[in-house]
Image (tube, rainbow, N blue to C red):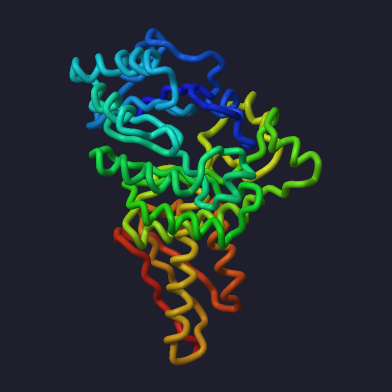
Amino acid sequence: MTIPIFVPHLGCPHRCVFCNQWETSAVRTPPDAKFVREKIRSHLDTKPGSIERIEAAFFGGSFTAIDAALQRELLGAAHDFILDGLVDGIRVSTRPDRVDAGSLDLLREYGVRTIEIGAQSFSDGILAAAGRGHTAADSISASARIRKAGFSLVIQLMPGLPGDSPAESLRSAKAAAGCAPDAVRIYPTVVLDHTRLAEIFRAGAYEPLTLEDALERSADMHELFAEKNIPVIRTGLHPLAPGETAGVLAGPYHPAFGFLVKARLKRRILERELARALERSVSAPSEALLRIPLREKEEYLGHRGENMEYLGALFAPVKIMRIFVNSDRPEIIIENAF
């Protein structure tokens, strides 16, 4: 279980064009030690019995760029729960250009185990357009320092920033994989109100990703990371409360975006398996029976069954049938017309 503690904009030297963390975190005031303790206690009080590992996680700002005294206050409040045996570790999120030996020593002192860096892209041009204030080389060097110091490394990427393209998103994913992270997060760019990106969008100078574009691009990145055995632990923004969605002006926000990406990946699997099975058929096929793993049936079927509709239209006139079975992967059975 991850206990999220948002520190919106704390430590950030400037405002990136896409950023309005007051909206995405639903936190309006900076946290202090009292807030951290209350947040952790409230989550521990509702902890399911099946949970085996608990982390407190500082998200939203550039943690290692926060004043050192405040870092110690926040970390100390969380570290007390580690000393009491109630929390197993701490993770923080920060900027790639604010990772040095001193900051890593401080984090280690308070039981931090995982450091997430907001690389967002590995294109210097895209980073400059986004107002990030760091370079791709900063992300590469920060990753190396974090791993050498013995921390777990997570890299965050944002496909769809101004100047990005499908090819560039994939190139950034390859560069991130080259840093050997323990995991990655993928956050397709969404236009939030009260940001510089909102102004650029309203001026007609930025075209956000459609939901379909974001699904395809995220699925491409997922497949690349899967080939490298790098897990993707989050895709898309966390679901916003009903009152907060008004702040989303444009872009591929969906409260179940992560599920939609998993369903798209399963659709690709079925499409490839079906195509191979039909190619091997010795005569004109009339039906294809999909034996779908019961454990992941929702992902294979897709949102409102859209995967089955897609496959039915793609492979028509072959009739696509399905049953659910206790297996680890789908199987295709072809029925031939006589």
Q: Residue at x 26, y 18 (%)?
A: 79
Q: Is residue 235 visible?
A: no
**Where residue 250 sits: x, y (%)?**
70, 41
**Where residue 14 sits: x, y (%)?**
58, 28
Q: Residue at x 61, y 38 (%)?
A: 131
Q: Quadrant of residue 331?
A: bottom left
Q: Residue at x 72, y 49 (%)?
A: 207
Q: Residue at x 18, y 20 (%)?
A: 85
> Relative to residue 79, is residue 246 depicted above or below?
below
Residue farthest along the right direction in this orientation: 203
Left or right of residue 245: residue 266: left
**Where residue 42 sits: x, y (%)?**
37, 15
Q: Quadrant of residue 255?
A: top right
Q: Nearer the viewer, residue 221 or 161?
A: 161
Total residue callouts: 0
> Relative to residue 123, is residue 185 depicted above or below?
above
Q: Is residue 324 visible?
A: yes
Quadrant the N terminus occupies: top left
Q: Nearer the viewer, residue 106 or 115?
A: 106
Residue farthest along the top direction in this orientation: 34
**Where residue 310 sits: x, y (%)?**
58, 65
Q: Nearer the viewer, residue 308 or 111?
A: 111
> Relative to residue 131, is residue 208 depicted above or below?
below
Left or right of residue 28: residue 198: right
